[in-house]
Amino acid sequence: MDQPTDAMHRLAERAENILDRLEGLLPPAEPATDWTSAVAFRWVRNGTGRGRLEPIRHPHRLTLAQLRNIDDQKSAVDRNTRQFLRGLPANNVLLWGSRGTGKSSLVKALLNEYADEGLRIIEVDKQDMLDLPQLVDRLQGRPERFLLFCDDLSFEADDASYKALKAVLDGSLAHPPENVLIYATSNRRHLLPEYMQENESSRMVDGEIHHGEAVEEKISLSERFGLWISFYPFSQDRYLEICRSWLETFDLALDAQAREAALQYALARGSRSGRVAWQFARDFAGRKGLEG
């Protein structure tokens, strides 16, 4: 074979120089996830559009026993999670309903209950829904059991990212990994806004309601969650019971003074919920401490 010419040598050298410069402009490869560093992680996107798993060093320390007056909801979600951890059939879960009633707290408490059994939680923000297929691929084959936690999830009418969620839940050719479930919380049962005019396209066929295409599209998203858990506003008695429970964590009792203060606090907030009860207990305990 003929020896390469000088021109070819020079061309090869120039190509190598160009490649060296391009490599210097590229972002460094993301380090491998250290699964032993934490039991909770957060999916974070960088400036290049790629994502990475960031450990959450100090997750909430809520326990299931601390969550009061949501026993039915707690029992259903706990049972589904135990099935999942044992490799039995289990469902993706949508926890929906009134704000501050314990939806997110319930998911956080599951981590503390079952982290020693291999449960891991990965928090995924709504704006990163398009990354779900990429994230799920990373978790395939891992020995841990992962809950992808999507908190306060809802989509606007023109938001197409919910289609990525639909595909991961149940709607693509790829079979979902058996070690991954999605637990989402929302104030909306169908996760998308519902408008009166959309219901006008519904019709009756043989006595049954058939929804229009817009409504069917919205229902099809929430129906991909196999388990719906509903949360409702608290009555005054239930609210006070939760206040009593949280006050006990500060070594305080719900006496007449605390009861009146709790009711006034809820009135000012315009809401009776577990979140308001926790905030009241912190406020009341702090004021008592100053008086001490």
Image (cartoon, helix red, strand yellow):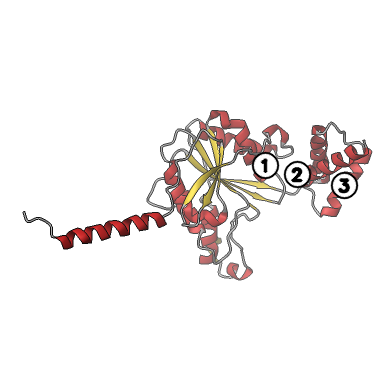
Where residue 196 sits: x, y (%)? 63, 68
Could you say which quadrant of the image residue 156 lies in? Answer: bottom right
For marks 3 and 1, the one nearer the N-term is: 1
Q: Which amino acid does label 3 sit on?
A: Leu
Q: In which quarter of the image is residue 104?
A: top right
Farthest residue to the left: give it.
1
Q: In whole angstroms, how far apart are the C-alphas of marks 1 and 2? A: 10 Å
The answer to whether marks 1 and 2 mark residues whose Cβ atoms lie closer than 8 Å is yes
Q: Where is residue 238 in the image (x, y as percent from the top left)?
A: 80, 41
The quadrant the C terminus occupies is: top right
* Residue bearing the label numbered 3: 263
In three-dimensional space, the C-alpha distance between marks 3 and 1, rounded to whole angstroms, equals: 23 Å
Q: Name the residue under label 2.
A: 274
Tell us which disc is closer to us: 3 or 1. 1
Q: Residues within 10 Å of mark 2 (few under 14, many from 20)?
A: many
In the image, residue 269 sits, relative to residue 56, either above or below, namely: below
Q: What residue type is labelled 1?
A: Ser
Residue receiving disc 1:
105
Number of numbered labels in the structure image: 3
Q: Can residue 196 be seen in this view?
A: yes
Residue 280 position, x and y percent, is: 82, 44
Pick the quarter of the image with the N terminus. bottom left
| 56 to the left or right of 286 | left
